[in-house]
Amino acid sequence: MRPINNRGLYMKLVLILLLLIVSLMTVVSAFIIRGVTGFYLDEFYEQMQMVFSGEQFVRDLRSAADEEDGEERIDSILNAYSGFMGIDFITRNYYVLDGESGQLLASSDNAENAEITPNIVTALTGENGYASNNTASYMDVAVPIEGRERSYVISVRDNKLTVRELTNEIIFIIIEALIIGLIISILLAFLLAKTMVIPIQSLTRAANRVAAGDFSQRIEVQAKDEIGVLTRSFNNMADRLHNTLLDIENERNKLSTVFLHMSDGIVACSADGEIIHFNPAAERMLGIDFIGTALTFDDIFGDIASLEKVMGMKSTEVIEGERSIMQRNLEIFIAPFFGEGAPGGILAVIHDVTEQRRSDELRREFVANVSHELRTPITNIRSYAETLVDAGGELPKETENDFLGVILSESDRMTKLVQDLLALSRYDAGEMEFKTEIFNTCESAKSVYEAMRLDAAKHDLKLSIELPAYAVTVDGDRARIEQVIMNIVSNSVRYTPKDGSIVLRVWKEGREAKISVSDTGIGIPPEDMPRIFDRFYRVDKARSRSQGGTGLGLSIAAEIIRRHNGRIDVESEPGRGTVMTVVLPSAEAAFT
Ligand code: ADP
């Protein structure tokens, strides 16, 4: 992780505090210095005004001015009052000037001449000069004293040295305080910066961790200040972000599992036609291995609709297309999708409708077959009955009996057909119940053999039976299994020409009980083999019908055996014969 640079924050805080202190001190010192100077100035003028408004003092000066040696007398009075006026002979001095010429006559510092200040100019005109000037390097007052003969001007002048010294002293103290203050403030600034920076540092580190996808740690919060609130808010935000990410991931996993296992094919393309997602069903149905290919939407679905056309559609619109690939019928639905602010894309859903089409076809075929199978006997019955009615009993007895025989056999055929259909629909609806018991299939084979022996003989066929010395037991519905064997034997009788032979065998092979019927009949062509268990399927329709077959026998047999968890194996060679073997789980297998 990148180390966090705190110098910026530290320096900023230190600088802010320094500036604060320096500006504060400057303002304070400016105020103090101005206050002190002002106070000193005011003090000076107040004192002077007080001195020169003292009656006794002024009277003494006036009377001194009246004398011949006025200037000496004035000088000595001023000297005597020097303490009263704050004259220290260094910073503050008095000057006695001639009231006419402004010439210096006497002074406390024995100066050669005196600078003529504006106040002295005022006093020379006979007015009191009390004007103060802050900017001047001195402060002074000048008062005129009128004598009988001569007039004088007395000026007291302070060179502000004390103020300057005081100011310098104050500045020195302030600078000292400033340096100590700065040192303290630097320390404080670093301390403050640290208390602020440490939580910010840990927040930054945590934010970096969260940005890198690590949600495992939370920042400990003790502070109740704004940084504490910010840290708590950050922890809450990280929690919510984590939960939201988990939810999104969960949703994504759910979706990809659905995608992976759904029977419909899904292909998603980006707005520029690039394939961005597909599922195994789509690959299987379209016969395309998407991985490693740079196919685009137009390459795969361009014949149904172009990328431009689909992207121009509304999100509620769908384009439907059909396609036949590898003998499978596919229905393809193509629709655009748009994300908020995102470029969106296209979703294609591929639906395999082969089975649906086949079952529709089978249903149509079945209805057509049923109607056809029923119409034939009905037409026969009707035409024979009509002939009988039309003849009005005029037909020879023998012909009449023949006709009635046909009517009977046709109605028997119809009854059988209806019964078979009923049985099949019951199997389909799952309504047929089996009465299961453990029985010996050798016994069943024997009873079928007994029942069919005469029929076979009638067709000049040799029916024989080969049974093992042991019992071959199964757990099932005996009557229905015997019905199946009977059905297979009667098919052999039906499809074996005269002088042929039929053998009924029973044996056990591993955990299976096997009952086979072999004949030397016409056999079944290999191309018809897969369909002989279909409803109404017959290799030779006319032959089957003439023999009383309905085309439903084997489909019912297959259904019964399937319900017993068994199967019917068929081996056949046209012109040589057929072997049909009923294979059932042996009853012993169920107990071992
Ligand atoms: P059907 O009532 O026509 O016999 P099945 O469902 O029993 O109907 O049999 C279907 C078809 O299978 C028959 O029409 C026949 O063409 C053929 N088939 C069945 N058993 C034999 C067999 N032993 N020898 C030759 N063909 C057979």
Image: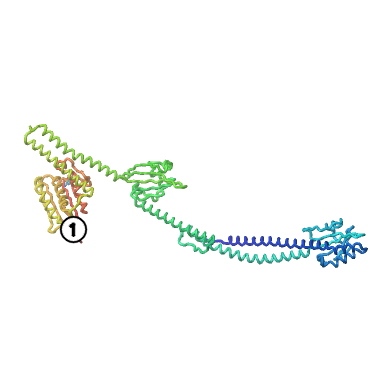
Figure quadrant, ligand 1: top left
Residue 290 shows in this picture: yes
Q: Is residue 588 above or below residue 549?
A: below
Residue at screen point 22% across, 40% down: 368
Task: Tell which of 543 and 80 is nearer to you.
Answer: 80
Residue at screen point 88% across, 66% down: 76
The amino acid pointed to by label 1 is Ala
Judging from the image, what secondary structure is the residue with disc 1 in? helix
Task: Tell which of 44 and 572 is nearer to you.
Answer: 44
Residue 568 shows in this picture: no
> Quadrant location of residue 311?
top left
Quadrant for the C terminus, please. Answer: bottom left
Residue bearing mark 1: 587
Residue 428 appears left or right of 441: right
Residue 130 in the image: x percent, y percent? 81, 58
Q: Is residue 197 above or below residue 445?
A: below
Residue 11 in the image: x percent, y percent? 60, 61
Mark 1 Cβ and ligand 1 under 8 Å apart = no
Residue 580 appears left or right of 336: left
- The local crowd at label 1, few if under 14, some if 14 to 19, many if 20 or more residues have their Cα within 10 Å, is many
Task: Tell which of 420 and 309 is nearer to you.
Answer: 420
Residue 554 in the image: x percent, y percent? 19, 47
